[in-house]
Image: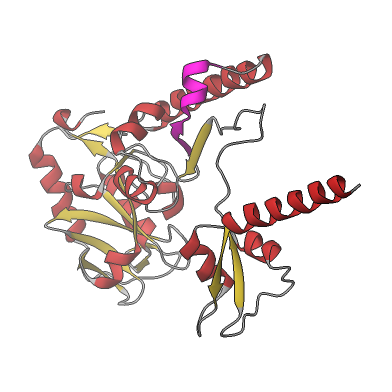
Amino acid sequence: MRKQWFFVFFLFLSLFFINSALSKEYTVKTGDSLRSISKDFGISVNEIKEANNLTKTILQPNQVLTIPEKSSTASTVGQEPKLKSVIFYTVRNGDTISTIASKTGVPAKQIIALNHIRPKSLRVGRKLILEKSAASSENGPTNEDDEDEDAEENADTAKLEKERQKEEELLGKWRSPDERQLFVKVATGFLGAPYRLGGASLKGIDCSAFVRKIYQIFDIQLPRNARAQSKVGMSIEREELVEGDLVFFRTRKPLGHVGIYIGNNEFVHASSTRKVIRIDSMETPYFQKRFQRAVRIKGLDNEGV
């Protein structure tokens, strides 16, 4: 009987010392919070709460907390870690391949290769593949259901790519660089014309009607509002802008304002604040932070279709 009790006592002591070795103590300082402590020690808030039987998140200075050892990344014995096969990013207003690469830490070349896209072909709402796990790429699908899902996903991606390529087309070509310069002269010839919301004549015209009117002179029919105009033609990066491209800005709506780029970081537009057609710089703080998208409607042969 004594031997039994001695064994139980020895087991208790062993467990006590093992737990002590796997944890440490921390004295709470003024300004500490469970979140800041969890970051410092690299463990979750819930792990700290469980180790100290805490029901509230409020801490008191000089309170002593038991900090458990970091959770092992190894999974339960006999089970392999569950890896996420694909990671996605949904394109937002104003995103470019370079900004997405900066946000996610995934190289731009990898994003382009995984999604088979051109840098200037992003569409808001599109899901981009950022990476595939080593497990999914090396070992292949883990079961038939995964294989079916992969096949479906590939089919959907191919379908979307075909639709995108169909959408991403210029609506026409300039006959020469001179014609494009003439386009700019015609657009700036309207400077000073009055602005009127919903207007479409020289008595008063709004931003999208102005853009539509100028392109109509050069045999291109555009939709009536700015949002619809942003979905035609070919998406381009800001640094690729040339005369005649359309530039879109966020107002009360994500794509609420449009103008015509005329070179030298300037664009001509029907301004609702100044109530006239005028030229503004894209580098002014107001337009700099509200820029959303650039679209090419017509191009020269060397600018690609």
Q: Which residue is at a point 21% across and 54% down the rendered structure image?
A: 261
Q: Nearer the viewer, residue 263 or 87?
A: 87
Q: Which residue is at a point 43% across and 41% down the rendered structure image?
A: 123
The image quarter in which residue 56 lies: bottom right
Which scheme is used to colour this image of the protein? secondary structure
**Residue 126 is at least partly visible in this image:** no
The residue furthest front is 2
The residue furthest right is 1
Q: Which residue is at a point 56% across and 24% down the rendered structure image?
A: 153
Q: Nearer the viewer, residue 81 or 265?
A: 81
The verdict on residue 133 being magenta is: yes
- Residue 253 drawn at (x, y percent): 48, 63
- Residue 132 drawn at (x, y percent): 47, 29
Left or right of 150? Residue 143 is right
**Residue 23 is at least partly visible in this image:** yes
Query: Magenta part of the protein: which range?
Result: 127-140
In the rendered view, tell whether residue 175 sits above or below residue 297: above
- Residue 124 drawn at (x, y percent): 46, 46
The image quarter in which residue 162 lies: top left
The image quarter in which residue 186 lies: bottom left
Left or right of 227? Residue 74 is right
The verdict on residue 271 being magenta is: no
Indicate the quadrant containing the C terminus: top left, top right, bottom left or bottom right: top left
Q: Nearer the viewer, residue 6 or 43?
A: 6
Q: Which residue is at a point 66% across and 28% down the rendered structure image?
A: 79
Q: How many labels were placed on the picture? A: 0
Left or right of 280? Residue 177 is left
- Residue 91 drawn at (x, y percent): 45, 45
In the rendered view, tell whether residue 148 sits above or below residue 127: above
Q: Nearer the viewer, residue 6 or 128?
A: 6
